[in-house]
């Protein structure tokens, strides 16, 4: 449900991964016909009755107490669907599993109709942290993000294009009250994503902390985040620093990363090979590069993680959850 930036990526992902479907229903706020990859889809307005007969409802609507998830997710469950929700609305509810299939797939077994998809920047970091945590137990995580504008929805992509075109033409760039907090994003960096919350951190930064702790079932995991919006259309990048109880060398870390399905290690600095957003855009995998040991802290490691925020950060992770539910036989079949 929702045919914005993530909703469209979901439709493509379901098709590309040949998810078994007898019907694909598209819902949004307003009715219209949309075209994706040469195929037309009739979008219907979302209403409580619109989920009748649906087995899996992928939600990619708006955030907040009055958002699409708050308004319709329970109605979808009452109709018999399992909801996989991309918004942050249910993520921190204790009884609702928050799942990255590479990390905590077994949490799916305790769902009661709603499963939350984590924040895009959390998902790619969690995939990278998991093998290190299993091998050496994480004691500290410090992350700085470089997040693409598509992470803020389709309107932000259009806004960046307009600003960049204006600046390139030597004109004053337009600003938009609903995009980039009213700032100019083109040829700039924005060290604020979402509003400020406790201790001077933004809500996006707290999401990375709290969601990762929930996914790893470890509320004591020490994480600090700085999240930054960058003028990139697609692909979030992260500089991650970890300390572990057990020493993990850079070579060993690369091997651990390579052993994770869905991770691509691209790490050959001598040849200038490392992942950039342009490498990850359009791909389902999480890319890891620049793995190196801390010269001063014995058990410290730095690395660079890049993923397509609309795919692994949203649509792919949601569809992987749906695939896993089918594999586990926990979806009603009509
Ligand atoms: N973009 C990302 O990288 C990313 C990653 C992870 C999670 N998310 C989350 O995924 C969700 C969707 O994000 P997005 O980037 O796709 O946003 P978007 O491009 O702004 O699209 C939002 C879609 O939701 C529909 N919608 C909004 N309010 C609705 C309502 N009350 N009832 C029914 N449909 C409604 C809109 O319908 P109309 O088209 O009719 O207006 C639109 O199709 C958000 O919660 C976001 O936080 C996004």
Image (cartoon, rainbow, N blue to C red):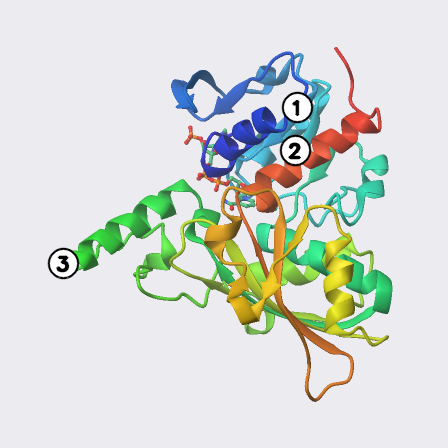
- Asked whether 305 or 222 is in front, the reply is 305
Point out residue 227 in the picture as x, y percentages from the top left corner: 53, 65
Q: Is residue 238 visible?
A: yes
Choose between 35 and 18: the one closer to the eye: 18
Q: Residue furthest front?
A: 271
Q: Quadrant of residue 84?
A: top right
Query: Marks 2 and 3, how far apart in space?
Result: 42 Å
In the structure shown, which secondary structural element does the residue marked by tag 1 occupy? loop
> What residue sits right under mark 2 in the picture?
319
Q: Is residue 87 visible?
A: no
**Closer to the camera in the image, 103 or 275:** 275
Task: Check disc 2 and report its element: helix, strand or loop.
Answer: helix
Q: CA distance from mark 1 to mark 2?
A: 8 Å
Q: Where does residue 36 sit, x and y in percent of width and height?
A: 43, 24
Q: Residue at x 71, y 54 (%)?
A: 127
Whichever of callouts 3 and 1 sits on the residue coming sooner in the sequence is 1
Please give the residue where the numbered disc 3 appears in the rendered image: 171
Image depth: mark 3 or mark 1 in front: 1
Q: Are marks 1 and 2 in contact (CB under 8 Å)?
A: yes
Q: Earlier in the sequence, mark 1 or mark 2?
A: 1
Residue pointed to by mark 1: 19
Going by the image, does 59 lie left or right of 27?
right
């Amino acid at each position: 449900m929702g045919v914005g930036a993530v909703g469209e990526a979901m439709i493509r992902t379901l098709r590309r991964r040949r998810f078994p479907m007898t019907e694909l229903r598209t819902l949004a706020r307003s009715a219209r016909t949309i075209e994706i990859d040469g195929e037309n889809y009739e979008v219907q307005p979302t209403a409580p009755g619109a989920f009748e007969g649906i087995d899996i409802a992928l939600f990619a609507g708006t955030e907040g107490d009055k958002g699409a998830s708050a308004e319709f997710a329970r109605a979808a469950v009452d109709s018999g669907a399992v909801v996989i929700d991309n918004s942050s609305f249910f993520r921190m509810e204790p009884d609702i599993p928050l799942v990255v299939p590479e990390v905590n797939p077994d949490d799916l077994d305790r769902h009661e109709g709603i499963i939350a998809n984590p924040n895009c920047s959390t998902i790619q970091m969690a995939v990278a942290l998991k093998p290190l945590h299993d091998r050496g137990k994480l004691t500290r995580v410090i992350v700085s993000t470089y997040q693409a504008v598509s992470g803020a929805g389709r309107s932000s992509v259009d806004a960046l294009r307009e600003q960049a075109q204006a600046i390139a033409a030597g004109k004053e760039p337009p600003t938009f009250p609903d995009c980039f907090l009213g700032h100019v994003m083109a040829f700039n960096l924005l060290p604020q994503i979402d509003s400020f919350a406790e201790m001077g951190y933004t809500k996006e930064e707290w999401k990375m902390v709290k969601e990762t702790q929930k996914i790893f079932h470890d509320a004591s995991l020490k994480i600090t985040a700085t999240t930054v919006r960058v003028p990139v259309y697609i692909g979030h990048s992260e500089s991650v620093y970890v300390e572990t109880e057990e020493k993990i060398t850079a070579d060993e870390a690369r091997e651990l990363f390579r052993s994770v399905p869905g991770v691509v290690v691209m790490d050959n600095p001598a040849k200038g090979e490392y992942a950039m957003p342009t490498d990850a855009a359009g791909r389902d995998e999480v890319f890891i590069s620049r793995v190196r040991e801390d010269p001063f802290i014995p058990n410290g490691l730095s690395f660079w993680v890049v993923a397509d925020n609309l795919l692994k950060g949203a649509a792919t992770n949601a569809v992987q959850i749906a695939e896993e539910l089918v594999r586990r036989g926990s979806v009603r079949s009509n």
